[in-house]
Image: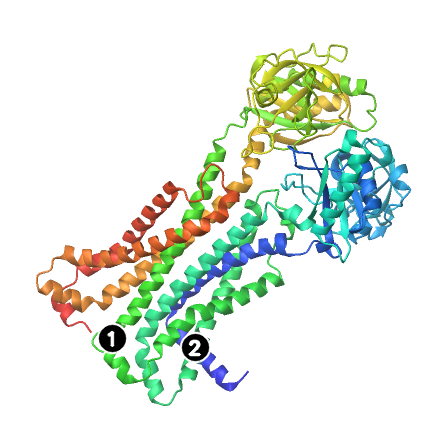
Amino acid sequence: MPTDLIREIRVAARVIWKSPGFATVVILTLALGIGANSAIFGVVNAVLLRPFPFHDPDRLAVAWEVMPPPGDGPMFLSPPNYLDVSEQNHSFERLSAFAPGPYLLATDDGTVRLDGARITSNIFETLGVGPVLGRPFRPEEDVTGRVAIVSDRLWRGPFGGDPAIVGRSVMIDGVAAEIVGVMPPGFNFPPPIDLEGNTIPRQNDIWVPFATNLRDISRSAHFVTVLGRLRPDASVTSATSDLQSIAANLGRMYPESNENWSARVVSMNDVVLGNLRPALLVLLAAVGVVLLIACVNVANLLLSRATGRQKEFAIRAALGAGQRRLLRQAVVESQIFALLGALAGLALAWAGTRALVRAAPANVPRLGEVGIDLTVVGFTLGVAVLTGLVFGLVPALRALAPDLTQWLREGARTGGAGASQAGLRDALVVVEVALSLLLLVGAGLLFRSFLTLRGIDPGFRAGQGLTLRISLPRTYTESATRYATFREIEDRVRGLPGVEAAGFSMDMPLASDYQGTEMQIEGDPPSPAGSRLANFSYVTPGYFAAMGIPVRAGRALGDEDLPEAEPTIVINEAAGRLYFSGQDPIGRRIVFGVPRRIVGVVGDVRLESLSADALPAMYVPYYQSPNSRSLSLVLRTRTDALALVDEVRARVRAIDPGIPVHDVRPLEQIVRESLAAPRFSSMMLLAFSLAALLLAAVGIYGVISYSSAMRTREIGVRMALGARPIDALRLVIGHAMRLAGLGVALGIIAALVLTRYLRSLLFGVGATDPAVLAGTAVFLMVVAAAAGWLPAWRASRVDPLNALRYE
């Protein structure tokens, strides 16, 4: 390190040490801005920027089938279509398929429910990741099955990290399977995705083959997700065109199942992170604005301080110090401030990152990887260096008067700033106010959107409701056995004290994928493929009462809807409006497997999210089609529902100890979780906006206080000539309000331009909502008036005689 630089660092350290109060304010201001940026960057780096732990993940892409118009939405592939696409495409090195699902693993401590997936044997080759113990699946095991691969987490947990696990036989869903491999630590596949691009939190611990000939499955059974590795010369666009040509050819070959279907290819990064990216980038931009406001504040502080040091710099220049050396000295001081602020900011970032991870929605992928690592530290130091230049350079240049004569001419009478420096400080305050208003408007829009969402009726009564998932082992192969078991569970649970109603459903609103299927109405002309889609769910008679879903016409499903009775079905109001053209649907029949008579119409329930309109839905009696081995039990209680969980488990174990009860959640929790993402975005942006508002208020206070102090002599003269204290008060407050008013005007202009980027995050409120703009402007003006009040009050108390002697 050059000797001159070492000397300048020592001088800067001494200067900073002589002003501990000033240094503390500067360092804490910078720590707030830098720490917030580092914390959010830690999340963005782990979730958006860090590559997935697969080989060359940028070449991984997901292939969807696309339903015919007017549906025109993405859909999973059917297994035969996947095989044909694998053989005929020219864009992928290889294609693999998987289907996520729950599994029941028998351990020494009882049956454990695990998330995992059925996969094709080549999927590890596609990912470029293989087991660290044992081997991957062999091609013949795609059909024969009876093998499994487990996660490192599962291996170290129930299996105690036993290296002899390879070759061990376990019971999965009641069927014996041999463990042939253990995946590396941190491996979590499939990625948390669904058709709508929403993330679904999953910790996958077990993988098994499909164990069937995929050619034998119907082409109308769309349930596998296809993942492929693009060839080096292929792109997502060219792969989409390639697969669309194949889809058109399959439509000609198999018109009954494939006509008018298309295809779409999306990079895996976009599929997994698509809906998260806008919210995280908005937060990153918000903390960037907070840092900019912090820089403006510190620049104003240093500018005020530099005014007092003009004499020092002028004398040093007169004694032979060159402009370059003086400038370097000032920059070294600002860099020391910035680095000290960065160190304090890293401490804040460490605490802030932990708080962010706890507050973040559970559906944010890779949250476990968020932390302060070398990348975040490097980012923080880079931000510190840049920040030091931003807030230190302009004050340094302003402080370097060319000679003592200029300093005496501009500020001799007051020892204060000249008009140009006062104007620069005022301009910086205007910028602070404008940036603060921009953040406050964004926070206000998101918060109002969140309140609107929270006021949406989900279509069911969440209070005093509880859901538990009950999964039967795979040994329950007979439909009659499944029917009898779930029927007995329902009867036993309904008899618990405090239970008003109990019923089963295949899935839960706001917590499951949309199960769209064709809806054909008996007696109507056949509709084009994809023109009549409805969600379907198998439910038991007590489901509607347990959920609090009202019956609008006809009746709900009842105990009379038995396997031997006439097939029945219940639809919701949305299906009645869309597909029956105002006619009474009761008594009509819908073809769903077999013709089913409509016996009732129930209220609409929000299936996908509170922000999405209610979709057409059909409810089929589970006891007439007892195919699923995993159902959600819903309880409506008069007392605390959670207090009944242990008793429910005991009654289920009394039927079969091997049946696990899991995924216990109050219905209110399901509603809260559906609001987690908008709540997180609005609360984070609101927190950053309040931090920016605090910094802006401090900036206004500092500038008005300094300005009024520099005008003490002027105010004294005014009061000696007859001005009243209220006139001095009005003078100083007016200065603050003029600065705030100009900042508000600029901020509103910026908000009108930039808030359109929030549209994808808003619900029920426009990006330029007048109420939010006006309310934010008024609020900021009140804060500005409050920040200027104390300096104004002090100015109004000036003694004219003392002021005239003021130097």
Mark 1 Cα shell of 10 Å, populated few (<14), some (14-19), many (≥20) = some
Q: Residue 114 carries which label?
A: none
Give the answer, above or below, for where 557 lies relative to 667.
above
Between label 2 and label 1, give the one nearer the viewer.
1
In this orientation, does residue 138 appear?
Answer: yes
Q: Which residue is drawn at 56% across and 33% down?
A: 612
Q: Quadrant of residue 659?
A: top right
Residue 226, position as x, y percentages in the image: 76, 43
Q: Residue at x 70, y 29 (%)?
A: 529
209 or 256: nearer the viewer: 256
471 or 401: nearer the viewer: 401
In this orientation, does residue 186 appear?
Answer: no
Q: Seen in the image, is 364 located left or right of residue 54?
A: left
Distance in Å between CA atoms under marks 2 and 1: 23 Å
Q: In which quarter of the image is residue 419?
A: bottom left
Mark 2 Cα shell of 10 Å, populated few (<14), some (14-19), many (≥20) = many
Quadrant housing the C terminus: bottom left
Mark 2 or mark 1: whose residue is earlier in sequence: 2
Q: Residue furthest left?
A: 722
- Mark 1 sits on what residue? 415
Residue 445, position as x, y percentages in the image: 44, 43
Quadrant housing the N terminus: bottom right
What's the amino acid at mark 1? Gly
767 or 402: nearer the viewer: 767
What's the amino acid at mark 2? Ala
- Mark 2 sits on what residue? 12
Q: Seen in the image, is 280 located left or right of residue 67?
A: left
